Amino acid sequence: MSLVYERQITGPATHAFVIGVGSYPYAKPGVSPFGPNTPLALSNVPDLDSAPVGAKLFCDWLIGHADGLPAPLGSVHLALSAPPTAPTSASQYEWKGRLADASAIDPRGNSTAISSTDGASIQQDGTDWSQRLLAVPNQVAMFYICGHGAAVPTRSVVLLSDVAGGPIATSTPWQSHVDVQYLAGVLSRQAELREGYLFVDACQELITDVVLGQIDSSGGIGDTLRFYPQSVAATKNKVLLLVPGPMGQLTYDDGQGGGGRFTQVLVEALNGAGARNYTGSGQWGVLLDGLPRAMNTLYRLRGWPLDAFDPTPIRSLVTSGPIVRYQTPPEVPFAVMLDPAIAISQADRVCLRDAANNVIVARADQAEQWIGKAQARMDLCYVQATFNRPNVPYQSQSLTRVDLSEMRVDPVLLHRVT
């Protein structure tokens, strides 16, 4: 069953469809029923441990911020598959015991089972998702998918579990797949929909078969799954489609079982690290125009290679409102270096203090760059360095003021110590 969260909302609601494709059983050597006609790119597709992990991270964010979304969260459909070597729990999901939301139910009862990621299951789940969205005017769509992908200028596809074969015959080994560019385009023409947010953690790899399919449809990749009715309405800039990078970009996980890098920094940003005091009066939220920049900064703080990440909006949503609002100020990251940098290693204490001299947060390690998190605030705070050791050529002092109304890591704050 794909419906894992349901809540009765009076008026417009947010309805989400989340997919993590981690298993590709037919795209393996000698397995595909297409035999020698199987494209090389589909002859040995690796399974993805990161896909179900990322999908569950995104679900946790949705449910954890159910009342902070552009419209209150009304439902979440979730489909997962995991590699055959993964534990059973990898393709299960539970939230009632972890995320408090007394007003919502889990329609599965005590079960943690999840719908699969083959074409037939995704078609059914996507149709249910679309019907909920179109049942009431002014609703909000959320969509997330992680899996293997490919892209050309007019198509960005994510492969489903039964690609290269499966119990239902298809006209091409490239089926089943979801074309997220097509999905975003259809959503942008749904007159009753207020806005949509689509996040894709999948490679934007250029594959010859996909490119040639744009020239000769007889040798193409076939049709995408379709969840929404065609519309002749004019396209509106009310849908965000965010992918990990421009065409040709590959994606990576963290190598630690924590999910895809794109998803990790996306969820971190949406959990508050990318927040701003967007009203100027103490209301924090994540604005779309700053989201890719925040993700890039968070990526860099993780120490991952810098040449493999550039979140790119293929479609842009024009709005002045945030994608998520916070009832209380969230924690935002900051970075501090002293000048000279070596001074920080000789300090007894480096901390942030408020105007009343209360410690907000203190440095816990000896790194030359102090990277930390503190609750966002409207009033200024101060960096304080204390030097009490003998023969240390620095004096204890309060240093430059720090504005923590949003993340302060780019550029790193430099404070001269005398």
Image: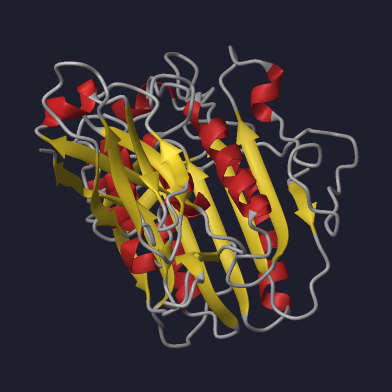
Quadrant the N terminus occupies: top right
Nearest the viewer among 260 and 122 is 260
Q: Nearer the viewer, residue 283 or 210?
A: 283
x and y percent of residue 32 in the render?
Answer: 48, 23
Residue at image coords 29%, 21%? 366
Q: Position of residue 184 (x, y in %)?
A: 44, 66
Q: Is residue 82 above or below residue 413?
A: above
Image quadrant in which you'd find residue 137: bottom right
Q: Nearer the viewer, residue 212 or 143?
A: 143
Looking at the image, what colour scheme do you see? secondary structure
Q: Residue 340 vs residue 163: left or right?
A: left
Residue at 59% in and 71% down: 140
Residue shown at the point (52%, 54%) measured from the top left: 330
In the rendered image, which quarter is residue 42 located in? top left
Q: Is residue 332 left or right of residue 108?
A: left
Q: Work out whether residue 39 or residue 394 is closer to the camera in this orientation and state it.
A: 394
Q: Quadrant of the C terminus?
A: top left
In the figure, residue 326 lies in which quadrant?
bottom right
Rendering coords of residue 149 (x, y %): 37, 41
Q: Is residue 265 above or below residue 402?
A: above
Q: Is residue 202 visible?
A: no
Camera sees residue 232: yes
How many dots with numbers?
Answer: 0
Looking at the image, the residue that sits furthest to the right is 109
Q: Residue 175 at what x, y percent from top left?
A: 48, 42
The answer to whether 119 is drawn above or below residue 131 in the figure is: above
**Taking 377 as reference, is 372 above or below it?**
above
